[in-house]
Amino acid sequence: MTDTDTQIKDTVTGNDVVLFMKGTKSMPQCGFSSRVAGVLNYMGVDFADVNVLADESIRQGIKDFSDWPTIPQLYVKGEFVGGCDIITEMTLSGELDTLFDENGVNYDKDAADKIREANG
């Protein structure tokens, strides 16, 4: 295991919710990262953000780690959940709420309902 793999593993296991993204949760640097960070921020989820643009080894390393070719990547309780399209679908279907409930992740259920109402 490389230092990068160890760093990624420590990050995903040391935080309940982690988003590997382009930019930061307060200043996303791409539309897909912005969408996922926006959903998590709106729902009041406490999550760690990892800016892959700040470290090329992390940018490639997270793709190898998850065997998933794109950024952003969301992890909940150490498990890879998906990228932008998957998180969007899970948010609209209520699956993300279920995932958070099952893993004891705090979020604003009313905000999640508002997202669904606005996109229904």
Image (cartoon, rainbow, N blue to C red):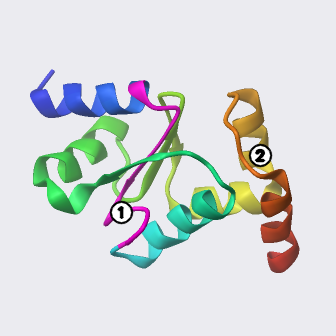
Horizontal side of 61 relative to 21 (left or right) equals left
Q: Amino acid at mark 2?
A: Asp
Indicate which label's residue lies in the foreground, 1 or 2. 1
Quick one: quadrant of the N terminus? top left
Quick one: quadrant of the C terminus? bottom right
Residue 91, position as x, y percentages in the image: 72, 58
Disc number placed over residue 107 in the picture, else none: none
Alpha carbons under labels 1 and 2: distance apart: 23 Å
Q: Which residue is mark 1?
A: 24
Q: Residue at x 78, y 69 (%)?
A: 115
- Nearest the eye: 110 or 102: 110
Residue 27, position as x, y percentages in the image: 37, 72
Q: Which residue is mark 2?
A: 97
What span is in magenta?
Answer: 14-28
Residue 73, position as x, y percentages in the image: 43, 51
Q: Check if mark 1's residue and mark 2's residue have beta carbons within 8 Å.
A: no
Q: Residue at x 41, y 25 (%)?
A: 13
Q: Is residue 96 depicted above or below 10 in this figure?
A: below
Residue 36: name its quadrant: bottom right
Q: Is residue 97 depicted above or below 110 in this figure?
A: above
How many labels were placed on the picture?
A: 2
Q: Is residue 18 depicted above or below 70 in this figure?
A: above
Label 1 Cα crowd, 10 Å radius (few <14 / some 14-19 / many 20+) = some
Q: Residue at x 80, y 77 (%)?
A: 119
Residue 103: within the magenta? no
Horizontal side of 117 relative to 34 (left or right) equals right
Label 2 Cα crowd, 10 Å radius (few <14 / some 14-19 / many 20+) = many
Mark toward the start of the polypeptide (1 vs 2) = 1
Q: Amino acid at mark 1?
A: Thr
